Image (cartoon, grey):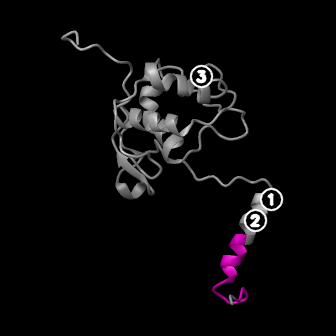
């Protein structure tokens, strides 16, 4: 028999009580996103982030490199932006938040309806690590309540393989014609 009045159980029972109250009140508990935050060394980034120089001109930033939540082995051809990823992002990310209209996010520093950077606005190519982190690792995009569809598991696997495979634009024909 567990006694909830014991000194070791009080903090536990109070934290469970707090979580239940937050759930009943409609509160959403959200973990901070450290993707793209400046860092100097590995200790500046919490798990599962790594301090790396992955973004051109950004110095070292915290990034998730195949962290928890990734799909199984990256088998098969690497998906491309043109054929595989752009339609997923158009359906799940662009219409209200990360395209010409940013009313759902308020973010104007990147757009996911573009592949390349235009001016000072990043495109999907530069955002591939963040797209991966938010849709595959943490599954926080798209946020609930906006009426946007969630990517399917197959779509998440495509995003995983695309970002892990270098975020290629389109299939390019081989030079030998084959």
Q: Is residue 108 visible?
A: yes
Disc 3 on helix, strand or loop?
Answer: loop
Disc 2 on helix, strand or loop?
Answer: helix
Q: CA distance from mark 2 to mark 3?
A: 37 Å
In x, y percent, where is residue 21?
Answer: 78, 64
Q: Which residue is mark 1?
A: 24
Q: Is residue 155 left or right of residue 51?
A: right
Alpha-carbon neighbours of circle 1 within 10 Å: few (<14), some, or many (≥20)? few
Q: Which residue is mark 2?
A: 20
Q: Is residue 111 visible?
A: no
User: In this picture, which residue range is highlighted in magenta?
Assistant: 3-16
Q: CA distance from mark 1 to mark 3?
A: 34 Å
On residue 99, the disc is 3
* Marks 2 and 1 in Cβ contact (< 8 Å): yes
Q: Is residue 100 above or below residue 3?
A: above
The residue positioned 78% from the left and 53% from the top of the image is 26
In x, y percent, where is residue 35?
Answer: 47, 44
């Amino acid at each position: 028999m567990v006694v909830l009045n014991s000194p070791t159980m009080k903090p536990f029972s109070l934290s469970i009580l707090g979580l239940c109250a937050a759930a009943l009140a409609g509160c959403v508990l959200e973990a901070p996103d450290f993707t793209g935050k400046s860092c100097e060394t590995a200790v500046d980034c919490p798990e599962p982030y790594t301090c790396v120089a992955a973004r051109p001109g950004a110095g070292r930033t915290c990034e998730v490199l195949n962290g928890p939540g990734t799909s199984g082995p990256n088998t098969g051809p690497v998906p491309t932006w043109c054929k595989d990823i752009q339609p997923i992002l158009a359906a799940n990310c662009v219409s209200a938040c990360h395209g010409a209209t940013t009313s759902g996010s308020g973010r104007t520093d990147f757009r996911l309806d573009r592949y390349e950077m235009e001016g000072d606005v990043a495109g999907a190519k530069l955002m591939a690590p963040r797209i991966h982190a938010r849709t595959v690792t943490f599954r926080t995009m798209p946020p609930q309540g906006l009426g946007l569809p969630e990517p399917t598991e197959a779509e998440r696997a495509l995003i995983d393989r695309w970002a892990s495979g270098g975020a290629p634009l389109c299939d390019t024909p081989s030079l030998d014609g084959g």
